[in-house]
Amino acid sequence: DQQVKQNSPSLSVQEGRISILNCDYTNSMFDYFLWYKKYPAEGPTFLISISSIKDKNEDGRFTVFLNKSAKHLSLHIVPSQPGDSAVYFCAASNKAAGNKLTFGGGTRVLVKP
Amino acid sequence: ETGVTQSPTHLIKTRGQQVTLRCSSQSGHNTVSWYQQALGQGPQFIFQYYREEENGRGNFPPRFSGLQFPNYSSELNVNALELDDSALYLCASRRWASNTGELFFGEGSRLTVL
């Protein structure tokens, strides 16, 4: 039972263009959504998050959009840079359930110079 | 501020053996959780520890067990290792009072079971 899904396993984008990563979830009890970035041989690092009471959160080049009715969120990276090449994980949590994170399967992003 | 550290970084075991993985939480963090990341998949929640007690568990059998110590460091123990236990084991920490669920991860311990 995959409660969080990232349907695109990989994404290739030209440097300077926009990267859009998508994530779908099924559990309506999730109240916080996070994106993590992972380089090889490193642990995931937090990128950006959004509360379920908001529909957009922006931090520099990164913006996360949440559509609760569609149970869908997306991460926009503008402009994409070669250093953004990594695996990106979408995750969701529910404070009442102890804030454990439920992760999607990840999207591998390659930014070409 | 010291981040999350894990040991060992790599290890190889044979089926049926037992393994202990260790984790030191980030300074100021009192809650530790463990995740298993199989190849090509996202991390899966194993369990969480707060105040030295298990506080939440994912869909893992009892042969996966853990401890948290008074200094908030933690251990993950896996008994009777199976081939499918081969994975990257990630430790993460946070403050219990955090509203966001944001976790700070270590680099992981890569376990290979032969």
Image: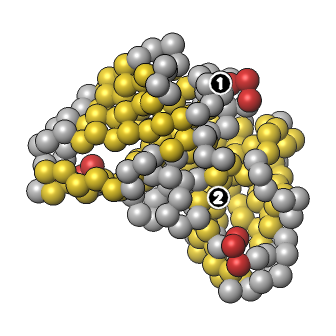
Where residue B95 appears, x then y in whole percent? 65, 31
Reply above or below: A110 against A27: below
Q: How many numbered discs sit on the rendered protein?
A: 2
- Both marks 1 and 2 on one chain: no
Residue annotated with mark 1: A29
Reply above or below: B80 against A2: below
Residue annotated with mark 2: B36
Reply above or below: A101 against B60: above
What residue do we see at 49% from left, 20% from top? Answer: A68
Q: Is residue B52 visible?
A: no
What residue do we see at 59% from left, 74% from top? Answer: B10
Question: Are the two marked residues, 1 and 2, in contact with CB atoms closer than 8 angstroms?
Answer: no
Q: For the residue labelled by badge 2, is the local secondary structure a helix, a strand or a loop?
A: strand
Quadrant of the frame with the C terminus of chain A: bottom left
Label 1 Cα neighbours within 10 Å, binned few <14 / some 14-19 / many ≥20: few
Q: Is residue A99 visible?
A: yes
Where residue A12 appears, x then y in whole percent? 23, 55
Q: A27 and B70: which one is in front?
A: A27
Q: Amino acid at mark 2?
A: Gln
Where residue A47 appears, x then y in whole percent? 40, 37
Marks 1/2: CA–CA distance: 23 Å
Where residue B8 appears, x then y in whole percent? 63, 70
Q: Which disc is residue A111 wearing?
A: none
What residue do we see at 82% from left, 81% from top? Answer: B17
Q: Is residue B34 left or right of residue A14?
A: right
Q: Is residue A59 left or right of residue B50?
A: left
Residue B94 sits in which quadrant?
A: top right
Q: B38 and B106: which one is in front?
A: B38
What residue do we see at 45% from left, 65% from top? Answer: A41
